[in-house]
Image: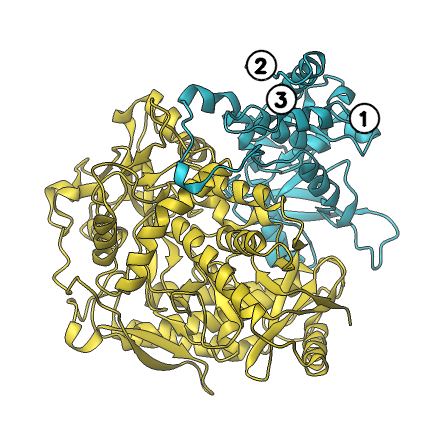
Amino acid sequence: MDVIRHDLIIVGGGGAGLRAAIAAAEKDPKASIALVSKVYPMRSHTVSAEGGAAAVARADDNLEMHAFDTVKGSDFLGDQDVIQYFVGEAPKELTLLEHWGCPWSRNEDGSVATRAFGGMSTKRTWYAADKVGFHMLHTLFQHSLRFPNIVRYDEYFVSKLIVDGGAVRGCAALDMREGVVRLFLGRAVILATGGGGKIFPFTTNGNIKTADGMALAYREGVALKDMEFVQYHPTGLPGTGILITEGTRGEGGYLKNSEGERFLVSRDYGVGTKAELGPRDMISRAIIQEIEAGRGIQGPYGEYVHLDLTHLGEEAIMKKLPMVRELTKIYVGVDPVHQPIPVRPVLHYMMGGVDVDIDGATTLPGLYAAGEVACVSLNGANRLGSNSLTECLVFGARAGLHALNFVRGTDGPNETVCLRQAEEEAGRIAGLRGKRGKEKMSQLRRELGIAMESGCGVYREQASMDETVHAVAALRGRYEGLGLEDKSTVFNTELTAALELGNLIAVAETIAVSAAHRKESRGAHARRDAKTRDDQNFLYHTLAHTGYSGPRLSKKPVTLGIWVPEERKY
Amino acid sequence: MSEQKKTFVITRFDPDRDPAPRQQSYEVPVQPDWKVLDALNYIKDEIDPSLSHRWSCRMAVCGSCGMMVNGKPSLTCKDAVSDYGNRIEVAPLSNFPIVRDLIVELESFMEKLKSVKPWIVKAKERALEEGAHRQSPEQLEEFKQFSYCINCMLCYSACPVVANEPDFLGPAAIALGHRYNMDSRDEGQSERNEIFRGEGTVFSCSYANECSEVCPKHVDPAAAVNQAKFNAVIDWVTGFVTTRGGK
């Protein structure tokens, strides 16, 4: 078996992975860094983010306001030390990206423009029209090409972490083109694989978002934290789930029901004068309530509400929201200059993830994580729009530097032991290729989606969550009987999809089990049978650990600070 | 919604067993709002799991799913099935080696991209304390369009020069190099212009304009190539003084 040796191995080439690689490469030009991804970096899902990245930039803003907005948005489940650090680093990181060529939109005086976003008390979201993720990703990727010590392994699927002597030593990865498993040895590994929106059937997430990094860490005994908190973005296109940015409302768009009424203004959904610029959890719930009250609009993919931009005018839409216009024309046949856009809440983001400290370190020595795959507890129970792109940069850079420090202070691995583990993994993958079985992949995936949507949707209750827990556990069993047909070694996407499905099911189970145990409503975890927040009993992070018969839960305290939990009302 | 049967004729190639690419037909019940990619995913999920193709965002921005549809380069998540007749041929992008089925080899592009130094070059690195550059909206307009490239490779597939001369730097890489040349923050024009004056770069372009016609993001790489040619010549004539050319 081929052994590939580097100092630092980064799994994932999106916003957080690239930022980590650049931070480490810059700090130590002699350090050799592997950037391993199942896709070419510019295909990473960061590319689909639209609206912007948050950092204090204006004279009427300050770090404390950004921190408090984030704490309140998190429904007091965010760790306040992490949040304080984040808001302080955010302006530096976005400025660095400017130095590296990111085409931020500009004010007339040449300064970087900012826009309003949900739950943010002033305009602090930096944007590049409505293609922010795309521009950030390509800027990071192109900038990373400068560094000879970043070595890319494109289209390598990491299927297992190699752990020996109580520390991570590397990973086993399938070279998708050659069809062989290779052993990557390093002194530290950073997971930066993003989220797992494909656990759900209706999502903004691309096909590659299959919770791979979360599953890798979870299998090695690292806890997944706060998995019950998944974010429904209020405005996705019916049918496809394609994201329509919150920037539409930041630029003045309205949400309207079938009666043409701006329901966030005329009815009390707890968002006060913020109206359409309330936080995502509340707006998504308001839309569901409007639909349940019979004020939705019927379409071929269920009921929806209208996102009305017609009053903004063609010039503003073309200048600030050109991609929205392109997307709605192509995917729903609507020109937002003249017609309202049909939208409904859509699964978008996972607040939970691999439990890491403020340095991105997990409990497994040498293993780090950053970006959506990680839960550093910046977002708590509900993330504010435009904080996550910045999170990729702030915590990607920090994880890169801290992992580099770890590299310098650790011994090399026992290669014989590592090789044996990788060979076992190669055997497992060979056995999976074209494996006989009676379960059909697309059927299991469909059933997983149905179960997760019914138990872990915008609104939840005990009975349906319990059913979902059982349904997902049953799918875990049935997955063992999966049948595959493709025996080819070359770019076998049936095989990688099977590995992905295993990851989806493992992580889905942590979501369902964590949700069923939180008997309160907080942020995105909204229960019909426990409608209020209960700080007395539930002001803690949920940790999900690998157990013999599904996830085992424990608690971790929330780091509070100057802000004492209070009722979350806008 | 009413579905309709259409025949998809797909190029298949598995180097493990096929001596050469072959075609395979599938009957697919398509929905009226489907894109070509939806039909490919249906085939993979319900008819033939061995079909191999790349895709991810399905919103025309990740650039993964470029293929030939009825002989023309297409971003399959963007092109509607209803725009085609009852028989639709899907093949891997032209002008690239096939890895398997609809998946092509992109390594040559990755090298070409890197060769144009697609990053901000500075004589002296700007310190973080100096803050963001000032860049007027007009200065942003100078290069913005060329930064829209999603690396989908449709332009390479359409380009008649690439077809004859695989080493030609090609539309996307030139457009991205030119994008940095036109960025008011960049100081690397002379380095890139020297690259552009080399063999197999801007002067190999034959003005076919096919690249701009197929570009799904309206980058207009042909315009970038023309501007880059002009600038590379002016730069050579004037020694080191560069122009930031017109639109």
Residue at the right extreme of this rendering? B19
- Does A569 appear above or below A339? below
> Which of the 4 image quarters holds residue A350?
bottom left
**Relative to residue B176, is residue B13 drawn left or right?**
right
Which numbered disc covers residue B224?
3
Which image quadrant for residue B37?
top right
* Relative image position of residue A199 (x, y in whole percent): 45, 63
Mark 2–mark 3 Cα distance, whole angstroms, equals: 10 Å
Q: Amino acid at mark 1?
A: Glu
- Label 1 and label 3: CA atoms lie apart by 18 Å
Q: Is residue A445 visible?
A: yes
Q: Are marks 1 and 3 in contact (CB under 8 Å)?
A: no
Give the residue type at disc 3. Ala
In the rendered image of this protein, which colour is used for chain A? yellow
Q: Residue under label 1, please give it.
A: B199
The crowding category of the residue bearing disc 3, from other C-alpha atoms within 10 Å (few below 14, some 14 to 19, many at least 20), is many
Q: Colour of chain B?
A: cyan
Q: Which residue: 55% across, 83% down?
A: A166
Tell me the element at label 1: loop
Q: Pointer 2: what residue?
A: B245
| Residue B45 on image: x %, y % | 60, 58
